[in-house]
Amino acid sequence: MSGEPGLGLEVHQNKFLAEGDRTMTAIVRVVSRGGETSAARTAAEVLMIDCSSSMRFPSTKIGEARRAAAAAIDVLPDGVRFAVIQGTDRAKTIYPAEDGLVTASDRTRAEARAAVEHLAAVGGTAMGAWLAKARDLFDGVPDAVRHAILLTDGRNDSQTRADLMAVLNSCEGRFVCDARGIGDGWEPAELTQIGRVLRGNVDSVVEDDKLADDFRQLVESAMTKVLPEVRLRIGTMPFSRLRSIKQVFPDEYDLTDRCREVGLREQELSLGSFASDETRDYQLILDLDPDLEPSHGQDRQLAWTELVPVPGAAVEEDALAIAGRWTRDPIPPTLIHPMVSKYAAQADLGEALTSGGDAYAAGDRAGAERNWGRAVALATAAGDEETLSRLSGVVEIVDAEKGVVRLRPDATRSHALHVVIPSRVSEIALPQEDRPMPDGTPVACPACPALSPAGANFCVGCGRPFGEAVS
């Protein structure tokens, strides 16, 4: 695959509003297509390995961390710039010996593998210091696709939450960081915040011996990135405001507070780095002025969105409108766009998983079974095998469709953390043509390919009243 990557933008919504509606939900999809993925393009990787005292217990933990770091180093292509950080209550670059990044080659990979064999678990945990060190290392390669992995087994006990947040704010947009928790002593909220601000994936590893494969896959995935950063611009009208923006695929994060004002009623959001062929979905919710006069029979622009030009990439679409059209026909406003419906169901599942985890942590077995049972039923209905696999570590499923479960007697906090970690990989929504229709024969539009529900007076695709002559 070669050539300049292309960036595409799509807006998916049901634009029809009932008389009193003053909220609009839309899914904005960002797609990258094509582009050079060879190791010849500039890439940089930093590994941050927790070496606090808790990594000594059990003794296999620090050993598996060494093995995972070596596995990640092994798959670095020639030419990639990299470094390894030993993380305690401070950050120390253990390879290369001097601060800076080194170019991957047979020699440097062998030297790095030898260096990680000497990682020792002693000290506290200050993840902000590790991230600040990674930020400074990445500053030497500003044009590279910059990626980091952070591994921890504990809480950020050697610095305040405010200090960690200050560092994260200084790192945002400068590199992407995937975070992993190992064991049962780490704090999901801290890792989720790291993944959210640095646009990375967050997960846990229940079985220590699976860590090396996970690290290997993270690096291999990072090496497919071709664009260091993509930015989305969102503009609103005098009568509209952005209530929230949430990444819903592939990882789920509320990014509302990460938007930055860049002009009058204009905000920008960093989306992180993109691979040569990648799709991400973002849910936007707009609030409209309650005194706004509805416009019947025509679209009204409620907001707009566009991709900020990226050096070395072709932006394929101009700004796209998020539109609204008020109608007195009672049916069109009730149709939920399949993408919106899919991600609403996904949010319900996430809430059930988190509520179950909260109940489990509080010792409320009945509450954990009730919420995780609901999660089993939702995941079963959605065909979400990944979530069902995670849930099987904490519950025995008695009746999947009805959500009847029993807590497993051998479940541990590590299993529970693996269930509730909110950065779950979701499934891509159903295509629009799979939208369920009400009972009755759908109505075909003479002016566009869309099918409208039985009894509709307006086309849900183009808004044309049925019976109107086609010019």
Image: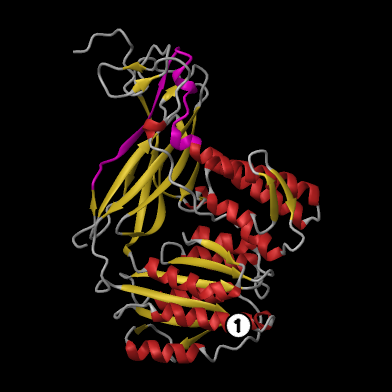
Is residue 59 rendered magenta in the image?
Answer: no
Taking the image as shown, residue 15 lies to the left or right of residue 5, namely right
Quarter the N terminus occupies: bottom left
**Residue 420 placement (x, y as % from top left):** 63, 55
* Residue 418 in the image: above or below residue 47: above
As rendered, which of 45 and 286 lies closer to the eye? Answer: 45
Give the extent of the magenta segment.
316-341
As rendered, which of 363 and 139 lies closer to the eye? Answer: 363
As rendered, which of 433 and 257 lies closer to the eye? Answer: 433
* Residue 451 in the image: above or below residue 12: above
Q: Would you name the residue on which mark 1 appears?
A: 62
Is residue 107 visible to us here? yes
Crowding around mark 1 (Cα neighbors within 10 Å: few <14, some 14 to 19, many 20+) is many
**Residue 394 placement (x, y as % from top left):** 69, 57
* Residue 110 in the image: above or below residue 306: below
Q: Residue at x 35, y 48 (%)?
A: 30
**Residue 106 placement (x, y as % from top left):** 33, 88
Looking at the rendered structure, the number of numbered marks drawn on it comes to: 1
Question: Label 1 sits on what residue type?
Answer: Ile
Taking the image as shown, residue 149 lies to the left or right of residue 88, namely left
As rendered, which of 313 and 209 lies closer to the eye? Answer: 209
